């Protein structure tokens, strides 16, 4: 989606009527503060990846990396819920890539929460 947005190309999409990535991507909701939502999502995923890669190498990320990942993923899930509600109620069109992103960020939140819980478990004893 980000590549299509930045290059002006169309997104490969199933286009079955209710699944219409172009309609979603060209809607007024596809930008936040003038920035394409797809680009924001990609930057969010890259930030999460950066924290995960560096959390064993940078002390502050070793201390707070798991919490940061959960916080970023939670923000992503909340934003995706908002976008999904827009797709379902306002646009009445769905983007398969948006739904896939929602699933991925939700799995990242669950995995991040489990990792944070495992870190905190010894402290509870």
Image: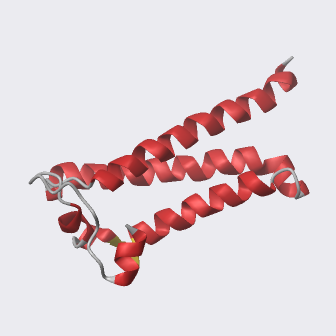
Tell me where residue 41 appears, x and y as whole percent: 48, 63
Q: Please, is residue 35 above or below residue 48 in the view?
A: below
Query: Going by the image, does 123 lie left or right of 116?
Result: right
> Looking at the image, can residue 32 be seen?
no
Q: Residue furthest left?
A: 17
Residue at 61 percent of width and 63 percent of height: 46
* Screen quadrant of the C terminus: top right
Decide which of 10, 57 is in the foreground and name it.
Answer: 10
Residue 70 lies in quadrant: top right
Query: Going by the image, does 64 lie left or right of 29?
Result: right
Q: Residue furthest top?
A: 125
User: Colour scheme used in the picture?
Assistant: secondary structure
Residue at 24 percent of width and 59 percent of height: 13
Residue at 71 percent of width and 45 percent of height: 67
* Screen quadrant of the N terminus: bottom left
Q: Please, is residue 109 above or below residue 33 in the view?
A: above
Decide which of 66, 97 is in the foreground and name it.
Answer: 97
> Looking at the image, can residue 124 be seen?
yes
Residue at 35 percent of width and 74 percent of height: 4
Query: Going by the image, does 110 lie left or right of 1?
Result: right
Query: Going by the image, does 97 lie left or right of 46?
Result: left
Tell me where residue 78 appears, x and y as whole percent: 44, 49
């Amino acid at each position: 989606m980000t590549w299509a947005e930045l290059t002006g190309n169309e997104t490969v999409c199933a286009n079955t009527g209710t699944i219409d990535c172009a309609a979603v991507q060209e809607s007024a909701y596809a930008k936040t503060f003038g920035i394409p939502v797809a680009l924001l999502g990609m930057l969010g995923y890259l930030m999460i990846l950066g924290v995960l890669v560096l959390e064993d190498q940078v002390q502050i990320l070793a201390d707070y990396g798991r919490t940061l990942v959960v916080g970023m993923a939670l923000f992503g899930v909340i934003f995706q819920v908002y976008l999904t509600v827009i797709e379902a109620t306002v646009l009445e069109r769905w983007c398969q890539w948006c739904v896939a992103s929602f699933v991925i960020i939700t799995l990242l939140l669950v995995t991040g929460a489990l990792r944070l819980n495992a870190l905190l478990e010894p402290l509870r004893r």
